[in-house]
Each structure stands twice: as structure tokens, then as C-alpha cells.
Amino acid sequence: MVLEFGLLNSGLFPASDAEGEGLNPGTVTQILNDVNGMCLMQTGIYTGDGQLSNPITGIGFAPKFVLISRVNGVDQSTTDVDFCSDQCIPDRSTHIISIGAAPWVRTRANRIISMDADGFTVDDNGTDANPNTLGVDYQFICFGWRSAT
């Protein structure tokens, strides 16, 4: 389900659900017309295929920002996170790995390699690595923007 959010001053509020039913008909429509747009959010899970290019589709919009996470290890002590916006240098994303209390932050190539019309594409860096390791489940959250019509 894609959630749509309208901006109201400095706050964010739900504008409609995936079926397009306004959560507060009339008022929400007027506010969205005033700000002329909606922030979209989609969450999901995909399984890595270990290939150089794995398109994650069915998001419902072109993402402006994607964050992907995976919890590693039996004790869940290591977390991998990759994120990128559509303004990133092409084929460059930020990678954070947290081992206990010591996070490492790096900019990496061959992770989130593109933002697409209906999703995003991930890579395994040619080594069956995150965020596209064969058989590994990844969680994601995408944000996008749609002009009000």
C-alpha cells in the first residue's frame, strides 16, 4: 500500500490510502491543492538474487529516496543499511554498518545503482554482497513526490 502525505506548515499528515480514499475529505483536498503535492511512502521486503542488477519494482512511483536494511548474524548484533537519493552521484550510495556500538559510514559504488519509474535497482558488486546477496531478505522504505491533480 502506498501512503500519501500532504504537507501542512512544518508537519506531515496522511492524505489518502492506496485506494485514494481521503482520510478527511474536503479539508485534505483543499490543503493538497494549496501545497500542490503529496509525499509518497512505500515499504516492503525483497529477496536478493546475487546478480549485478536486480530491479525492485511495483513501488507505485519513482522514488526520490530509498533506504535498505538488513540485520546480520544470529544474535542480530550487526546491521547493514544502504541509502541513496535521486540526487546522489549515479551509482553511489551511502553504506552504514553497525557492529555493536561502532558504526562505519562509507560511500560505496555498486549498491543502489538507479532510481526507476516504478522502483529502484540494486547490485551485488560482482561478489554476491549486500544489498543483493542471493537468498537474503532486505527491508526497504521509499519516499517519492507526486504533484496534486
Image: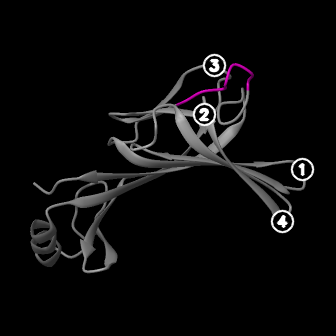
Count residues near mark 1 (Cα–Cα under 10 Å), then give few for <14, some for 14-19, many for 20+.
few
Give the CA distance from mark 2 to mark 4. 24 Å
Tag 2 or tag 1, which sits nearer the N-term? 1
Mark earlier in primary sequence (2, 3): 3
What residue span does the magenta drawing correspond to?
122-128
Q: Which residue is pictured at 22% across the width and 63% down the height?
A: 21
In whole angstroms, how far apart are the C-alphas of marks 1 and 2? Answer: 24 Å
- Give whichever of discs 2 and 4 has the lower sequence position: 4
Q: Quadrant of residue 131?
A: top right
Residue carrying label 4 = 101
> Which is more N-terminal, label 4 or label 1?
1
**Do tag 3 and tag 1 residues touch (Cβ < 8 Å)?**
no
First in residue order: circle 4 vs circle 3: 3
18 left or right of 50? left
Give the distance between the C-alpha atoms of the residues marked 4 and 3, in whole angstroms: 31 Å
Amino acid type, mark 2: Arg
Quadrant where the C terminus is found in the figure: bottom left
Distance (Cα) linking label 2 and label 3: 11 Å
Would you say the residues marked 2 and 3 are in contact, meaning their CB atoms lie under 8 Å apart?
Answer: no
Q: Residue at x 17, y 54 (%)?
A: 147
Q: Position of residue 107 (x, y in %)?
A: 62, 43
- Residue annotated with mark 1: 74
The residue carrying pointer 4 sits among few (fewer than 14), some (14 to 19) or many (20 or more) residues within 10 Å by Cα, namely few
Kind of residue indicated by mark 1: Val
**Rendering colour mode:** one colour
7 within the magenta span: no
The residue pinned by badge 3 equals 51
Q: On residue 111, which mark appears?
A: 2
Q: CA distance from mark 1 to mark 4?
A: 17 Å
